[in-house]
Image (cartoon, rainbow, N blue to C red):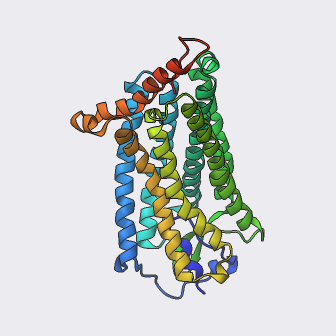
């Protein structure tokens, strides 16, 4: 079975080194523009790039320069930076998919894959941090009011980024460029260690998906129970944006992880199914980077009010409103100190 079809975007099987550097026997002709699925994914990827880059750049400008710096804006600014950097490198993957040949050299082969996984890990780690922050603020409002600072939030963001970078290093180690059947490809070379493919895939699945979601679910369960105890089940407004971000991340990244795990046992699955699944799963994962700024706009305030206001006002209100409303809720529920409130 020819495994070269898995070279789309950033995912494919390992290749034998001697096979990769064989002399080409014919000139490769790209077939992507003749296939409906490939053309559709190209169009979707271009839309993701345009909306994701512009949307996240707008979030960065508003949260970084137009709004008063707070813990809340620190979280969302970091998320937007991660998504914006990822979208900046999408044109390389789009070109690769259209030409079915890698023309950008070894460094960018490694770096574009590295950026994608830094984006994945940093996004989910920041969502975990925000969930824990909200949980602590609801459970211990007085302590949170006295100890939560912008400086500490910035340090936590930095640690999340460093951890994301560390877990993304395998992309630099195993990513390589080679020649196969008349074309240059950017591929994952796991031939140096027989178990490296499985180890990398499982680590990404558990560290970048399962473990973070367990923590997020626990945090939100505690928050919901606390709100019910204080008869505040209708006060869901402070958690709309965060809930939507978590749901979007789960929906966008789950197909990718499923097909990467299936790829580990590719002998037992249909080749075309895996190839199609990896292409669609990668496109859905990329879509997460443009969904986040959309959610900032349409989940923060009442939709009708935002629709009538300017784009800048809508985005600013979406990020700032969460802190204001939560502060009022916690102020009412604190029995220890009537003045105790905190921004989430």
Q: Which picture quadrant has residue 164? A: top right
> Visible in this render: residue 244?
yes
Where does residue 290 sit, x and y in percent of width and height? Answer: 41, 50
Q: Residue at x 68, y 72 (%)?
A: 264
In the rendered image, the quadrant that contains the N terminus is bottom right
Query: In the image shown, does 319 or 286 lie closer to the viewer?
Result: 319
Query: In the image shown, does 128 or 280 lie closer to the viewer?
Result: 128
180 relative to 320, above or below: below
Q: Residue at x 55, y 45 (%)?
A: 123
Where does residue 230 sit, x and y in percent of width and height? Answer: 55, 27
333 relative to 1, above or below: above
229 relative to 164, above or below: above
* Side of 17 where 296 appears, left or right: left
14 relative to 54, above or below: below
Q: Which picture quadrant has residue 62? A: top left
> Visible in this render: residue 81?
no
* Side of 211 where 66 appears, left or right: left
Where does residue 279 sit, x and y in percent of width and height? Answer: 49, 69
Query: In the image shown, does 75 or 221 lie closer to the viewer?
Result: 221
| Outermost residue, left side | 308
Q: Residue at x 59, y 26 (%)?
A: 137
Query: In the image shown, does 273 or 38 lie closer to the viewer?
Result: 273
Number of dots carrying numbers: 0
Where does residue 224 sit, x and y in percent of width and height? Answer: 56, 37
């Amino acid at each position: 079975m020819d495994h070269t079809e898995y070279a789309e975007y950033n995912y494919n099987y390992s290749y034998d080194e001697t096979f990769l550097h064989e002399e080409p026997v014919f000139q490769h002709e790209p077939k992507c523009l003749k296939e409906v699925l490939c053309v559709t994914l190209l169009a979707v990827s271009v839309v993701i790039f345009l909306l994701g880059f512009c949307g996240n750049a707008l979030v960065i400008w508003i949260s970084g320069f137009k709004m008063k710096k707070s813990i809340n804006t620190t979280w969302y600014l970091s998320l937007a930076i991660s998504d914006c950097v990822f979208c900046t490198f999408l044109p390389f993957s789009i070109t690769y998919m259209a030409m079915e040949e890698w023309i950008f050299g070894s460094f960018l082969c490694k770096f574009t894959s590295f950026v994608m996984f830094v984006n994945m890990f940093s996004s989910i780690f920041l969502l975990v941090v925000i969930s824990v922050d909200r949980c602590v603020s609801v459970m211990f409002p007085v302590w949170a009011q006295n100890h939560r600072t912008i400086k500490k939030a910035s340090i936590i963001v930095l640690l999340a980024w460093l951890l994301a970078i560390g877990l993304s290093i395998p992309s630099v180690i195993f990513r390589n460029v080679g020649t196969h059947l008349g074309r240059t490809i950017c591929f994952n070379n796991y031939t140096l260690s027989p178990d490296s493919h499985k180890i990398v895939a499982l680590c990404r699945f558990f560290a970048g998906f399962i473990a973070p979601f367990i923590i997020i679910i626990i945090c939100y369960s505690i928050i919901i129970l606390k709100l019910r105890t204080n008869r505040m089940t209708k006060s869901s407004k402070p958690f709309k944006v965060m809930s939507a971000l978590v749901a979007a991340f789960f929906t966008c990244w789950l197909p990718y992880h499923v097909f990467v795990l299936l790829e580990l046992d590719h002998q037992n699955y249909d080749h075309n199914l895996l190839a199609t699944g990896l292409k669609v799963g990668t496109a859905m994962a990329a879509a997460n980077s443009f969904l986040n700024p959309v959610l900032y706009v349409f989940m923060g305030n009442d939709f009708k009010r935002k629709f009538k206001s300017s784009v800048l006002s809508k985005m600013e209100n979406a990020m700032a409103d969460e802190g204001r409303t939560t502060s009022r809720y916690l102020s009412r529920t604190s029995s220890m100190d009537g003045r105790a409130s905190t921004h989430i």
